[in-house]
């Protein structure tokens, strides 16, 4: 069974940039191919080479690269839409390739020597990255020595560099948290991604053993998080002033939106021809199905408007030189968790309302359902924790100092 695609409903950005509009149009044209390749991607545990080539051809990996390296340097509201559109076709592709696109943003914070290194030859990098710190590092002459193990190296099969964080011993008993980028070939990739969903992301664990990392390939995590890293001196465009976690979470919730849109579209198509196995009722004529589709359509529309509204409002603040407060950043995290939860509830109901055949292994409905069931457990969308922080703020309680916002 194949899912249809409504090519007239691609996302629109107000006050957009021509290059961004062109990229979104090119991506929406890829959606049918992504759907056709989704089963192959899942069975092989990696994104197909044809998809990588297609994304390179339309310039997707240049979306968050400075113009001086021949990048597109798009206004931020385009980036979440990239995740969303890819998510209409294949959840694993949206997640893995979305992050390889997004991680170019982080390199803008590194010293100019690093930017020249990663962007100077082909104009973009495909770098997997791990947020949670692990391993250990120590300061040595000319750089650092790093060893350890990091999980969830999404897209590692397609990467050139990888971003990691480690507590770093800089001497005299002082420890600081640093961000590093390391050649992918320096890692040992462990075969750990034995999962039942999001299989094509290839999010295996990786290890390093006593790897020397030159000084220019490292920055303080706090400098990156608080937007005071050295590399930003060379990147004046407002996009580089986006808070790192806000940038990441508003984009990474996009696959939920795309999956919900894909299922709403295909389920309504199925209902137009489906007849109840025992009742003989045409689903198209049932009031209960009319009400269900109306409700879920409006729920999804409201969720998208919430997501896009906060994205555009945050971007407007950034372009007006308004630095988002920690409280605002906590709100963004709560919003994205709410969007993920709302989309999954829509996806779950849609996947069940057209009968048992939606759970056959050759039916893409069940793949979207499984993938989003899995992704909804990701720490980025941990609803209770993030809603607790935001609700406490609304009740006058200060954010904890260590809150990841």
Image (tube, grey):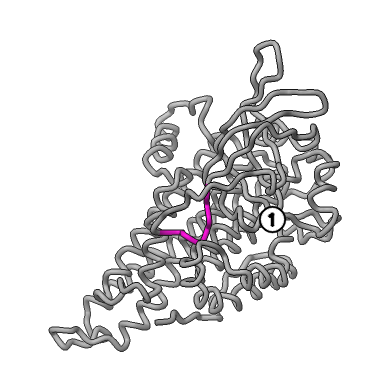
**295 or 43: nearer the viewer:** 43
Horizontal and vertical percent position of residue 321: 72, 43
Magenta: predominant secondary structure element?
Answer: loop
Q: In this picture, is 289 found above or below 313? A: below
Q: Secondary structure at mark 1?
A: loop
Q: Which residue is mark 1?
A: 126
Q: Residue furthest top?
A: 172
Residue sitting at x 48%, y 61%: 304
65 displayed left or right of 376: right
174 displayed left or right of 198: right
Horizontal and vertical percent position of residue 115: 81, 46
Among the 4 quarters of the image, the one containing residue 178:
top right
Label 1: how many Cα within 10 Å (few below 14, some 14–19, many 20+): many
Residue sitting at x 59%, y 63%: 81
**162 or 296: nearer the viewer:** 162
The quadrant of the image that shows the C terminus is top right
Among the 4 quarters of the image, the one containing residue 359:
bottom left
| Residue 376 among those drawn in magenta | no
Horizontal and vertical percent position of residue 323: 66, 39
**What range is drawn magenta here?**
197-204
Residue sitting at x 50%, y 70%: 88
Horizontal and vertical percent position of residue 50: 63, 73
């Amino acid at each position: 069974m194949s899912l249809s695609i409504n090519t007239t409903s691609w996302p629109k950005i107000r006050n957009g940039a021509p290059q961004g509009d062109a990229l979104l149009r090119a991506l929406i044209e890829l959606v049918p191919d992504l759907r056709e390749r989704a089963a192959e991607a899942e069975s092989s545990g990696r994104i197909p080479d044809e998809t990588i080539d297609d994304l390179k051809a339309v310039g997707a990996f240049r979306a968050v690269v400075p113009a001086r390296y021949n990048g597109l340097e798009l206004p931020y509201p385009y980036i979440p839409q990239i995740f969303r559109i890819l998510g209409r076709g294949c959840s694993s592709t949206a997640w893995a390739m979305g992050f390889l696109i997004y991680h170019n943003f982080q390199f803008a914070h590194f010293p100019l020597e690093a930017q020249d290194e990663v962007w100077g030859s082909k104009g973009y990098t495909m770098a997997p990255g791990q947020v949670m710190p692990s391993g250990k590092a120590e300061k040595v002459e000319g750089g650092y020595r790093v060893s350890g193990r990091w999980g969830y190296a999404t897209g590692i099969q397609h990467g050139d560099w990888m971003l990691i964080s480690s507590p770093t011993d800089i001497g005299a008993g002082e420890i600081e948290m640093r961000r590093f980028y390391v050649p992918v070939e320096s890692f040992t990739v462990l075969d750990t991604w034995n999962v039942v969903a999001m299989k094509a992301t290839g999010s295996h664990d990786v290890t390093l053993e006593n790897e020397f990392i030159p000084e220019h390939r490292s920055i303080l995590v706090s400098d990156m998080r608080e937007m005071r890293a050295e590399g930003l001196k060379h990147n004046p465009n407002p996009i580089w002033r986006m808070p790192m976690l806000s940038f990441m979470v508003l984009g990474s919730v996009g696959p939920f939106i795309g999956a919900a849109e894909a299922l709403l579209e295909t389920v309504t198509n199925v209902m137009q021809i489906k007849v109840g196995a025992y009742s003989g009722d045409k689903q198209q004529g049932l009031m209960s199905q009319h009400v269900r589709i109306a409700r879920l359509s409006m729920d999804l529309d409201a969720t998208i408007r919430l997501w896009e509204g906060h994205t555009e409002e945050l971007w407007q603040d950034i372009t007006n030189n308004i630095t988002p407060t920690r409280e605002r950043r906590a709100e963004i995290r709560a919003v994205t968790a709410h969007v993920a939860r709302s989309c999954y509830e829509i996806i779950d109901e849609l996947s069940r309302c057209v009968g048992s055949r939606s759970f056959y292994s050759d039916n893409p409905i069940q793949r979207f359902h499984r993938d989003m069931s899995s992704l909804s457990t990701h720490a980025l969308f941990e609803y209770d924790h993030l809603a607790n922080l935001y609700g406490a703020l609304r009740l006058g309680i200060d954010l904890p100092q260590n809150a990841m916002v």
